[in-house]
Amino acid sequence: MRKFYLAIIVFCVALSAQAQGKKKAANFNASKTKANANQFIEQQWWLGFKSGINWAQADPIRRYTILTPTNYSASQVEKKYDAFQEIGIQTTVEISYYYKGFYFSTQPGYISSTFTYSNQLQWVNPTISNEKLTQTYRQSQKVEYAEFPFIIKYDITGSKLRPYVQVGVFYSVLLNAVKTVSVSSLDEAAGGTNTITSEPLIVGVKDLFSNYAGWMGGVGASYQLGNVRLVLDASYRQSLSNIVNPQNRFANDRLSGIGDAQDDLNLKNVVISAGVLFPLRYLSSNFKSNDR
Amino acid sequence: MKNTILLIFLITLAASCAKDSDLATDKANFTRIYDNNKFDASNYPIDMKQTPDGGYLILGRRKLTDSNFSGTYLMKVDEWGAFVSELEVPSDKVAPIGPLLEVNGKYYFFTMTPIGLKTELNEVDSNGALTKTISVTGDGAGGYPAAAYNDNGRFLLLRYDNVDKESVVDVITPAGATSSYIGFSVGRGDNVEAPIIEHFLQTGRQFPFQIGKTTAGQYFFNGFYNYTFSLVFTDLVSDTPGVVQGQQDDGGFSALMPLDGNRYSAARFNFGDNYLLPTVTLNSTGISSSADLNGNNLPELSSNATVKIISATVNGKDISLYGSNTRSKQISLYGYEKATGKFLGSRYLGFSNPFEIAAVTTTKDGGLAVCGTTYVAGRFPRICLFKISREELAKSFK
């Protein structure tokens, strides 16, 4: 992880140095710059930082189970996935090249998502009504990835407030995954109604997940404030492939022991980010970063 | 622009190369727990065999409300471990014993009648359907079946004859006829018989009864003889067998697998302690004591633990694979090189809820299947099945 951030910092510094060098050259020969102004305002490099929050939902591609019913329907113990319930965070570095209203952008960063699901088991004695136990398993799955997207953005207008649309693809490299399992029981066989809530089981499950590729699309807006732009955008992201490593589906005995097997999953995220972008060329007052 | 196209191509390629599930992966490794939602249901596996279709046939026992003995339960699952069928055998066939004995594509196991204690031989097809029940005739017709062995199409049966107070070895044909037998006195007195009967009623200690044949063709059984739980070698003729004595019912062998000549892979128990002996030479004549044998003491195993030993090939090595139960309620596997007894590795199965081993077998794909009991929600005894791939085995037993 440290190496990843170090690489990003080195890359940004290199880009900045290149831009500053070009800025000095532009100041040194202002007349030449003005002569080429039309060319310059049509293209620009932007460097920025964005952070925000996201909501995740996992959709089963193929379902798996450890607890296999022999005298009742498997649908009774099927996992129920919650839709965009838990909040995750993300932070990215944006490097964009602007050309005639289009931005060709890479936004490497870190994203942490949490999705949740639950299932319920019940054992009953049809002839003795109080012989009944209900157990609810609630699973919270946090996954952390380094993301490497390639995004194309298009400014809809060229005013100070610029709404834009964006589409892209990304590749996510798994950094870590942790599962928290909470079990609550309603035991009516002990002579009364006994509600039991056990301490959550927290398990590192990096082996259960894998890298994946995905696509994204969204909208946003930037606001010109002096030489910088403030950015707010929202996007929807979805994996193009299974995010689970099937080889290790049953490898974790702590989870197998309580009957949890990871389904094959598609991961969806709704992501909202805010940040700031700095122009890497023409930072002087003569050449505002307004590039239209 | 070229770079852009290249990047999109690489991401698309990465997506297409993602590890999707496939049928081969899904049947190479899996864990299953077969649940019944009846509060009072109790199923315990006894043995398991892989069937020609790649699935698994499981023989078990179940709790009966109309008998003091255990009932019989059969279950068939497919090669992915998915449930196919179950059969709660009627309660006129009780106290089933393993292993499942395979002869000509059929599977056999012994039970007895709850009244009269008549021995029965049951035939099951590979789909888990009970196709025939044969009453054993001849001397092997009565008493408590304790252990069985497939001797090239004939069955060896160890049973306790509660009338003559003997451990009896029978040779029984698949047609149910007793071709030969020999009995050995367990000793007289209620103190001797009580733990034996409690074993069959499942109310007391479960003894590791076993019967088999050495590589030299000599029969052996692990059972009660002359007041002691002993390993007894017999030619079915002589009434002075070779004996490796235990310590009354506090010591003896937990499991035995012949290797070659007088060499065995064995496990023994002694007043709660457990010792694994990957290669040990036993004297099949005269009298000796299992307490004099050394072995690897494994304090992690539960008191007088159940032990299963099978032969397997892992990483090209012939190994003796031990399966047992730990004090932490996991199933433990230990691998030892057959030739030298060298320890190769261990693996533990199950967590959170208790797990107990019932049977372990190699599979056609070079992997391993382990069947056991787990207590779902910490209380409901249910059958579980672990399938471990050849690759996973190779990682565990290097």
Image: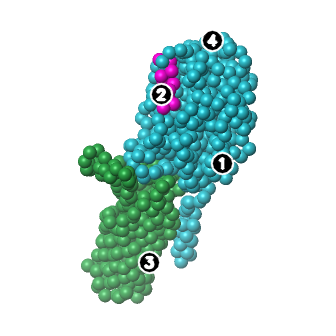
- Badge 3 element: strand
Badge 1 crowding class, 10 Å Cα cut-off, few under 14, some 14 to 19, many 20 or more, is: few
The answer to which image quadrant residue A273 occupies is: bottom left
Q: Is mark 1 on a helix, strand or loop?
A: strand
The reply to whether dot 2 and dot 3 touch (C-beta < 8 Å) is: no
Viewer-nearest of discs 1 and 4: 1
Q: State the colouring used for the structure image.
A: by chain
Question: Residue flagged by tag 4: what amino acid is it?
Answer: Ile
| Residue designated by label 2 | B198
Q: Mark 1 points at which residue?
A: B131
Q: Is residue B118 among the parts visible in the rendering?
A: yes
The residue beneath circle 3 is A167
- Name the kind of residue labelled 1 in the image: Thr
Colour green maps to chain: A
Given residues B312 and B194, the one toward you in this image is B194
Q: Does the magenta stretch include residue A154?
A: no
Q: Chain B is drawn in which colour?
A: cyan
The answer for how far apart the CA atoms under marks 1 and 2 are is 31 Å
SS under mark 4: strand
Q: How crowded is mark 4: few (under 14 residues within 10 Å), some or many (20 or more)?
A: some
Q: Can you identify the residue that label 4 sits on? A: B287
Residue A242: x, y in percent?
Answer: 50, 63
Q: Mark 3 lies on which chain?
A: A
State which region is magenta: B191-201
Name the quadrant of the N terminus of chain A: bottom left
Q: Distance between the residues labelled 2 and 4?
A: 28 Å
Quadrant where the C terminus of chain A sits is: bottom left
Q: Does residue B317 sit above or below A189 in this rendering?
A: above
Q: Give the CA distance from mark 2 to mark 3.
A: 73 Å
